[in-house]
Amino acid sequence: MPVGGPTGGHVLRGAIGDQRRRLAAASLLGMTHQACEAMVPVVVGVIIDQAVATGSTGTLWRWLLLLAALFLVLSTCYRTGARITEGAGEKAAHRLRLELGTRVLDPRGGADADRLPGALTSIATNDAKRVGSAVTVLPYGAAALAALAVSAVALLRISVPLGLLVLLGIPPLLWLGHRISRPLEQRSETEQERAAHASGVAADLVAGLRVLKGMGAESAAVSRYRHTSQDSLAAALRSARSRAGHEGAVLALTGLFIAAIGLAGAYLAMRGTISVGDLVAAVGLAQFLLGPFQLLTYVNAEFAQGRASARRIAEVLAAPAAVEPGGATPTDPVAGALRLRGVALGALRGIDLDIAAGSLTGVVARDPAAANDLLRCLARETDPAEGAIELDGVPLTALDPDDLRRVVLVAPHDANLFEASLLDNVRAAADTASAGIEPALTASAADDVARLLPDGVDTVLAERGRSLSGGQRQRVALARALAADRPVLVLHDPTTAVDTVTESRIAARLREARRGRTTVLVTTSPALLAVTDRVVVLDEGTVTADGSHAELVTADAAYRAAVLA
């Protein structure tokens, strides 16, 4: 689905359109089932008039056999139609989850803007399920309408006034049901938004649980989640009350309508206009009509909630891309020379910087926000507000983000590990076989981590690598970045949780592992900066110093304070 295109209506119609054959078959089966249901009281009325009243045993058996056939058909149609309908709903929801996953993983980004990961998960699960439910109820709606039509025709054959009463009364009832569902739709959308936000906050707190405990901030975190959860609960209760009110109002209107049909039938029977069997059939049809009307109420409510969820899904699918692809391709082979000219974004204020191909360059940013903005520009998660960045003379904005990331890898400080083996985590982005990642494990000292694990590199790590210490996680993440073997590698504080001795060993091995390829270390670690060819200092959003680590330590007091403090 193209970015910027779909709306809630498009999402819902698309989900229905993809399953139209299944829905058509299920609708036909449902209509047959409801038609047979409607015919049961009619057949019972005929049995009373033609068999019971006359005492004809043969006639009774013939009509009983017909009644049994009706039950066989309606039972078979219901089971088959329900199976097809549920399958259509599940497939529609699955398709939406795939579309959401594709959009979130789109190299151009933008889908996660102002949304917590937990909120996106909620949209991909709860909202997709509700749209699938809206697809599921369509055959039930068609079946209910078929039941009303068959009942109206049957009542017309019994008595024209009764048939007209049904035909003229159904449209106003359906219109009122639709009007009553408007508040439910609005409150359902609010409920889903609050629930998604609560899920996002919960996931955020669980991810940072160790940090919160270390800071002693559990009470503040609990208070934050309690407030968010209470908002979500209040929205859910408002939605539930709205749905209960909607169903109660429609049920009351339906009850009055059915009572009117029963009274009219009784009046006609008392006047002798219709027979006793006709009266039984009319009353039976009036009672039967309660089912289709309740079904339509259910369909209306599910559709109202489905429309609300479809709008939330559409917001993600239609989110504008953070960056747009260009038509150029990286040079072949990639030398790895980077040039920044007047780059401004957030905390960056017109940076001019040249990084030679094959060099090992350190970047010290006094302001963490400036480091983060620089990494976002180099990874092309966003484009600079001003200025340009070039790779081997080609502007990054002229490259497709996916092509760029195949040659430039920006490894963030908080890189997550997957719930997989250590080996699978390391070779996740590598193009080589398992044997080819051994140098990466050695250079990052992750081989020491593997030796401490029960199954070595085949040990399965917990989610986000929580079964490892902070330093161990950093070493495995660094090994993954090195194993990717990109022409340009940008590392952000890769050893902040590693002990001093191991950090020095990693620094020496890192220089050797990346020899001849461009590497940028955004860090304040003196051990890492000591092995660089050159160090660039960013302060107040601009380059304020440039030289070797030894020169800057000797001549620049601000640099000493930032690096050696």
Image (cartoon, grey):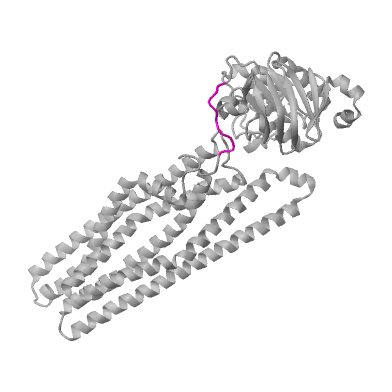
The quarter of the image holding the C terminus is top right
Residue 483's quadrant in the figure? top right
Between 64 and 496, the one lying in front of the other is 496
Between 396 and 251, the one lying in front of the other is 396
Residue sitting at x 73%, y 21%: 354
Between 50 and 541, the one lying in front of the other is 541
Work out whether 325 lies above or below 314. Answer: above
Residue 64's quadrant in the figure? bottom left
Residue sitting at x 77%, y 24%: 362
Residue sitting at x 31%, y 68%: 171
Between 337 and 88, the one lying in front of the other is 337
Q: Is most of the magenta stretch helix, strand or loop?
A: loop
Q: Position of residue 477 (x, y in %)?
A: 67, 29
Q: Position of residue 126 (x, y in %)?
A: 51, 51
Asked whether the viewer can see residue 428, the reply is no
Work out whether 256 lies above or below 135. Answer: below
Q: Is residue 565 left or right of residue 407?
A: right
Which residue is most to the bottom?
A: 271
Query: What is the count of numbered marks?
Result: 0
The quarter of the image holding the N terminus is top left
Asked whether the viewer can see residue 542, the reply is yes
Question: Magenta stretch?
Answer: 321-329
Q: Position of residue 170 (x, y in %)?
A: 30, 69
Q: Is residue 90 left or right of residue 383?
A: left
Q: Position of residue 262 (x, y in %)?
A: 27, 78
Asked whether residue 342 is drawn in magenta, I would say no
Residue 272's quadrant in the figure? bottom left
Q: Is residue 43 left or right of residue 78?
A: left
Work out whether 43 lies above or below 9. Answer: below
